[in-house]
Each structure stands twice: as structure tokens, then as C-alpha cells.
Amino acid sequence: MSQAADTFDSTPGSRLALAPGGPWSPAYRVLTAGMLLTIGGAAFEALAVATILPAAVDDLDGLRLYGWGFSAFFLANLVGIVVAGAEADLAGPARPFAAGVVLFVAGLLLGGLAPTMLVFILGRAVQGLGGGIISSVAYVAVGRGYPDAAKPRMLALMSTAWVVPGLIGPGVAGVVGDSIGWRWIFLGLAPPVAVAAALTLPSLRLIPGGNATERDRVHLLRAVQLAGGTGLLLTGLGAGSVLLAVPALAVGGGLGWDALRRLLPTGTLRAAPGLPAGIATMGLLSLAFFGVDAFVPLTLVEVRDRSAAFAGLALTAATITWTTGSWLQARYVHRVNRRALVRFGLGLVALGSAGIALLLSPSVPATVGIVAWGVAGLGIGLSYSTISLVTMETAPPGEEGAVTSTMPLASALGVALGAGIGGALIAAFGSDDEPATASLLAHDVSMIGVVALAVVVAGRLPQRPVASSAASPTVPAPNQ
């Protein structure tokens, strides 16, 4: 620890030369271990919750609010990302990290002990806020806490911290949910996350802040406006009364649109060629994929009467093929037309979504769901990573950080909208006991329509590199 301490100046915004070495060298191994354990815990929860959510809503009589189990998390998540970035620039990453862990653990306890669905949703929102802060601080820690030579290795380790929970999380969650109850997914995860954070915090205190001298309150307020407007919009979609729905849709849509227009690069909302089209395609891809992904376990458990463990296999299959698609993209993206590669991936997402829609027919084997969602995972692995690369390459020089930060924002918003739209359809056409097959079918078809729109927008992406790129990154799945 003393070696690391000697590498930093105590003055905020300044830093002496970092000690040489990789992430596991003596100067950095404590920080590395703590960060990976914390990220892994958050990743496990994010990827496991979809598996046990059908059991949670059944226990809490909250099927009509199913979509909010995801939407609340991701709307709060995007606020957390903005809050943490501003605070880390102002005073260093330790303080926002500690706040993020406290919020995340509090959200786990709140969700695990929830007596009603509304309390459960509140817990998910608190988890999302804390998870967004933790995620943002992780990248700040890599940027300021490691020497340049160690950063690629640390980013790869962080990707692995997502891949491993993605492989085992849904399956473990299914077994735990079926055997001792869904609540232990949340309650059992709280102590390990707290211990991992305690390991990480001392090293984070050694990392200084950035050049900011005051909080960017305007940017924060726009993020809150976006989350609030989107939440109001989703509330309007699920409202049973026209008198409530119309004003909620109008006000929520207006607030969200205005915030997006100010937060995203100019031209994104009209999918202008190049960078704006990349951000727009990212949002549409996330909306379409995760809009279906959120309801795959519900389809298998409630409609096809399969176990939570079986439903987890479909999510695990998607995680494996997503990783495969990312590596294939890294191998071939410099040899093929990037626009075509994105469109091919989008086509696979549409094909997988159609397979999930077929599951609504009792004559189709339930195992089709595992295969179909594996196909969709391959598609998003190819598309997501390629879009990320195109966005990085088309960012104006000197503005790479600001531009790339809009990718997770667009992605999180897409996830929240996808889950919220499906939840609104269930609330409108389902019962308190089971979702209407027609509502799930309508949602699957609408998400395939979103894919079709994404294919059109992807036509405005560059076909070839517009700037040199050393390597194509493998991008991990976003927190579910």
C-alpha cells in the first residue's frame, strides 16, 4: 500500500508519476482485487435478477408492475453514472464509491426484505443508483489509478468480471430461487459486496480528483430530468385511465425529449450520418434486445411452466454467444463492411426475438427458447461491439471521453424503455395472476419492429474506418 501512496500528490487534480507494473503488481493488487470483487458482485445481481423476477412478482402479487423491476433500476442507474463522474472529477473517486456501495447494499436489503412490490421497485431503484455510481467510479479508477501500460489489462479484467457472473449467475439464481427462495439472491449478496468495498476503499482514497473546481449541476439536472421524464412516460403507458395517461405521456415525453436533445451529441435524435447514427443505433439495439430479454424468463416460467433454473439457461446461452460475437467482431471488423456487420447482428437479434415469440405457442418445444436467445446473444455481440468501435472512431479529437459516455446513457435508456413498454402491455392486457399471451406477443413483435428501425438507422454508419484504431474492444454486457 505504501508503494501506491508514494505515486500520488495530495493536491486535488494533480498526480505524480505512477509506479510501474501491471494490475497485479504489489502497488495495485489490492485495488485490483477489490474493484473486481465489487464489480463481480454487482454484475451477478444484475444478471441474476431477470431469472428470479417472475418468482418475486408472483410472491408479491406485482405482475402488473413487472417491467418496473428493470426500468426503475436503469433510470436510477443513468443518474448514478452522471453523479459519480462529477463527484470523482471534483474530489476523487473514494467518496462517490463509498456512497455507491452504501446505496447498492441498502437496495439489496430493501429488495430482499420487501413486503410489497412497490417497496421491491424502490429497492431496485436504490440498487440502480448505487450500481451506476460504482460502474462510473470503476472507469475513473482505471483512468487515474493505473499506469498507461496497465490500463488495457485492467479493462480486460473488468470485462471478465462481467463474463463470469454472466455464465453462472442466471443458473445459480434459478437454483437458489427454486430451492430456498428469491429473496436470498439479494440478501446473500449484501455481505460479500460490503467486504469487497472495504478492501477497495483505502486504495481509492489515494487517487486524486480531476480538474473540476465545482459541480456541473446543469448536467446532473438534465440526467434527473431524463430519468423523471422517462419514468412519467412509462407511467402513462401503463395507466388504466385516459385522463391519467394523456397528461403523463405528454409531460413525460416532452421532458425526456428535451433532456435527450441536450445530453446526446447534436443530430442523434434525427440519426445524422456518422457519430449521431452510432449513438442512435446503440439505443435502439439496447431497447430491442433487452426489451425481449427482460421477458424471456417470464415467458418460460409463467407461460411454459418451466423452472427458474431452466429459464436461466436461456440467459446463460445469450451471455456465452454475446461474448463469442464480441470476439468474432474483434477478429473480422477490420476486414468487413462495418455497416453490414451491424446489420447482420441486428438480423440475428430479430431472428432470436421471433423464436421467443414462437414459445408462446404450446406446440413449440421450450428448448427453442434457449437456442433462439443464444442466436440473439450472438447478434448483439456482433452489433454492440461494432457500434462501440464506430462511435469511438468518429468522436471528435479531444472529445472522446464526453462522446463515449453517451453510449451507456443511450443503452441504459433503451433498456428502461424496452422493459417499461413490455410491462405496460402486461398491465393493460394481463391479469393479476398471469400475463396475457397476446401482450407478450405484441411486445415481441414491437421489439422486432424496433430492430427494423435500427437496421435503417445503421445505414448511416460509416462502412470503413474513418480513423486509425489500434484494436477493437470487446465490450461487456450492460447491468441488467
Image (tube, rainbow, N blue to C red):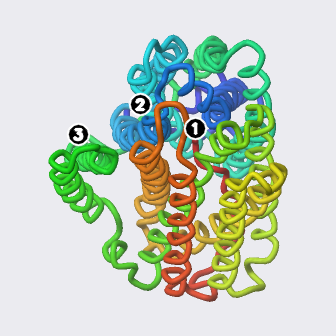
Residue 259 locus on image (x, y percent): 25, 57
> Which mark is in front, 3 or 2?
2
Q: Quadrant of residue 99?
A: top left
**Residue 263 can be seen in this image:** yes
Above or below, 353 relative to 22: below
Mark 1, Cα crowd under 10 Å, few <14 / some 14-19 / many 20+, is: many
The Cα atoms of the two marked residues, 3 and 2, are separated by: 27 Å
Instruction: Count neighbours of disc 2 (C-alpha within 10 A) and say few if under 14, some if 14 to 19, many if 20 or more.
Output: many
Q: Is label 2 in a helix, a strand or a loop?
A: helix
Q: Amino acid at mark 2?
A: Ala
- Find the distance from the CA under tag 1 to the CA under tag 2: 29 Å
Q: Which mark is residue 125?
A: 2
Residue at which label 1 appears: 145
First in sequence: mark 3 vs mark 2: 2
**Three-letter code, disc 3:** Glu
C-alpha gap between disc 3 and disc 1: 22 Å
Q: Is 125 placed left or right of 360 in the picture?
A: left
- For the point 46% across and 68% down, the residue is 279
Upstream in sequence: badge 3 or badge 1: 1
Give SS at disc 1.
helix
The x, y position of residue 60, in whole percent, is 50, 20
For the C terminus, give its image quadrant. Answer: top right
